[in-house]
Amino acid sequence: MIAEHGVRIWAALARRRRGLAKGWYKYSRNSLSVLGLVVLVLIGLTAGLAPYIAPYPEHAAAYTNFREAGLPPSKDHLFGTDRVGRDVLSRVIFGYRFSLLLGIVVLSLAVPSGVVLGLLGGYYNGTWIEVLIMRITDVFLAVPPLVLAMSIAAMLTPNLFNAMIAISLSWWPWYCRLVYSVTASLRNQFFVREAELTGASRMHILFKEILPNCFGPIMTKVTLDMGIAILMGASLSFIGLGAQPPTPDLGTMLADGAKRLPSEWWSTIFPALAIVMVILAFNLVGDGLRDVFAVEEV
């Protein structure tokens, strides 16, 4: 009995390894997606090791050195210095930390709530539960996400945490709508009917039978939305509703450097390029995942 159980576990692991190998093969055929993954890994390592690889880690905090203020790029300061003498490269490296943290927290809050509501709405299609969930979702979707996030952030104390909350409240409806569409299309499939006839609980049907079939679209959207969430966070910081100085947030650095264009262009150009790079990396990875799951669905 134990031997048979061990054989089944080993067979399941072998199938999973073959599935991962097959998925990686399909993903690796898109060279741009592989490039995006490499860039994303490098950005993640840079953010994680920021205190050790930043040339001047102390410049990420409250620091001033007016004798070196506004210096152009040089061998001592590859990205130049800002208006109070802080190394721009060091602050960009630390800025990646806050950008990735914002994206992770926003999606960690928005995805579960949107997925659960989408599952309920799609499964109870045609009932008052579906009507209530989807009408509330439509109300949120009627307002552009950035405008809604700005409105919520403006009512709260401007800081990084409240910016995360504001973006999360504007982001969950998109996952609700996505999962609702998939769930509604699977609601009358044979495997769902079979689970109902065998007496499976509603929780089992929703999270064991239907949810795994939503995994592909959800993962693809999560990857693509990471870049958009980071951009929205930078936008809120740019207008003063996000992270506050001296936090080395990329949006805050952009807003500060924009006041000194074109003379001190490096204070704006390099943070802007950092934002573009992380957004482009997430989009390339998302395109690769979309291709993998699309091929698997076919």
Image (tube, grey):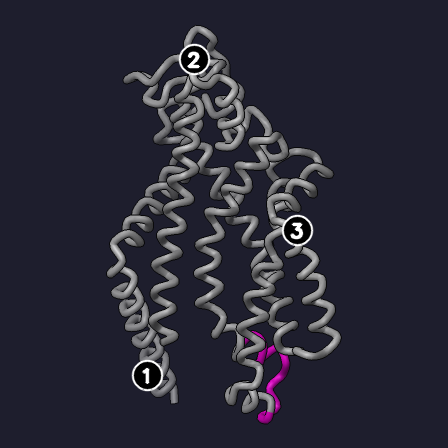
**Mark 1 to mark 2: distance in Å?**
66 Å
Q: Residue under label 1, please give it.
A: 7
Residue drawn at x 32%, y 72% as measured from the top left:
19
Q: Residue under label 3, please give it.
A: 143
The three-letter code of the residue at mark 2 reads: Gly
| Extreme-bottom residue of the structure | 197
Q: Is residue 190 left or right of residue 292?
A: right
Circle 1 — which element? Answer: helix
Q: Residues within 10 Å of mark 1 (few under 14, many from 20)?
A: few
Dot 3 or dot 2: first in sequence order is 2
Q: Is residue 119 above or below residue 111?
A: below
Span colored in magenta: 197-207
Dot 1 or dot 2: first in sequence order is 1
The three-letter code of the residue at mark 1 reads: Val
**Mark 1 to mark 3: distance in Å?**
54 Å
Residue drawn at x 70%, y 67% as measured from the top left:
133
**Mark 3 to mark 2: distance in Å?**
40 Å
Q: Which mark is residue 178?
A: none
Dot 1 or dot 3: first in sequence order is 1
Residue 71 location (% of width, % of height): 38, 13
Tell us which disc is closer to us: 3 or 2.
Answer: 3
Q: Nearer the viewer, residue 83 or 140?
A: 140
Residue 194 location (% of width, % of height): 54, 91
Q: Is residue 143 above or below residue 174?
A: above
Q: Main secondary structure of the magenta part?
A: helix
Circle 2 — which element? Answer: loop
Q: Residues within 10 Å of mark 2 (few under 14, many from 20)?
A: many
Q: Residues within 10 Å of mark 3 (few under 14, many from 20)?
A: few
Tell us which disc is closer to us: 1 or 2.
Answer: 2
Residue 294 location (% of width, % of height): 37, 69
